[in-house]
Image: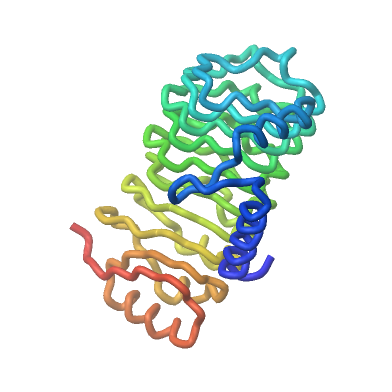
Amino acid sequence: MGSRQQLHDRGHTILNRLINNCLLEKAGDDVKMHDVMRDMALYIKQLHFIVKAGTGLEELPSNSEWKKDVERASFMMNKVSEIPLSLSPNCGNLSTLLLKMNVSLKRISKSFFQHMHSLSILDLSYTGIKQLPNSVSNLETLNVLVLRGCCNLRYVPSLEKLEALRKLDLRGTGIEKVPKGLEMLTNLIYLNLCTESLKELPITILPRLSCLQCLVLYIKSACVKMNGLELARLRKLEVFEGRFNELIDFNAYTKSIQGQQLISYLLVMAPPG
């Protein structure tokens, strides 16, 4: 896939091409699809997409409304409070599921992900969930798992089977320990563990994640110990944010990265307390 900078540049090239051809339009600092284009796209893909973003939904569609051929579903920015045990969509082709910003969502039943064998992108950011169901552990095709801003989240099940995972965002969650099996995610290129509640980061984990390009570990008040020499072994890092509690680790890391191609970094030396 190349470096993060190459991916960034390629993404902007694609966006500019779409804007120049009037398929997207600028909206301040953001980019959005024109309403007419969006309606046409949804009409063309109506058998394969379910898009009910920002419609005030208080519950997800029933099992019968989830067609077997559905590939992408978006229910973000709604008022869903619970995903009940009775809801277990038979969607073997579903690759993208967006539930972010359902701030009142507190519980997801264990059966909900049972038949989503092709799920690649799962975004549950800024919801009120307290735990992920254990069925997430079986989503072996998952590439992206976003849990950012889930401040009530305390439990994430084992990730050891999710070897395809490339992005894991746990920023702002309530976890105290990293999920079990994190060291097995050898294809991970993005990891964000910036959360005030995290109390432990086993030093044996990071060296296993040799493909990491972006690592965010900066935590203002937490006392997570980071080993400078172990961090230095991550030779593909382009973006790094971290806080060191020991001067020896800070010095070891800063010396070891001389000559490396870090594009962006934030290094803080601050003892605990």
Q: Position of residue 190 (x, y in %)?
A: 54, 58
- Pick whichever, 106 or 93, lies toward us: 93
Query: What colouring does the structure picture have?
Result: rainbow
Furthest residue to the right?
69
Compared to residue 209, the image places residue 63 above or below, namely above
- Left or right of 5? Residue 203 is left
Is 236 displayed left or right of 243 in the figure?
right
As displayed, is residue 24 above or below residue 2?
above
List x then y, in percent, for residue 218. 35, 59
* Residue 189 image offset from top left, x and y in percent: 59, 61
Q: In which quadrant will I find the N terminus?
A: bottom right
Can the viewer see residue 266? yes
Any part of residue 208 in sight = no
| Nearer to the camera, 157 or 43 | 43
Residue 128 vertical position relative to residue 237 in the rendered view, above or below: above
* Quarter containing the C terminus: bottom left
Outermost residue on the bottom side: it is: 259
- The image quadrant of residue 201 is bottom left
Q: Is residue 119 left or right of residue 178?
A: right
Name the residue located 49 percent from the left edge and 18 percent from the top edge.
56
Q: Residue at x 31, y 78 (%)?
A: 248
At 60% across and 24% down in the image, what residue appears? 52
Q: Position of residue 18 (x, y in %)?
A: 66, 52
Pick whichever, 192 or 39, lies toward us. 39
Write down the quadrant of residue 220 in the picture.
Answer: bottom left
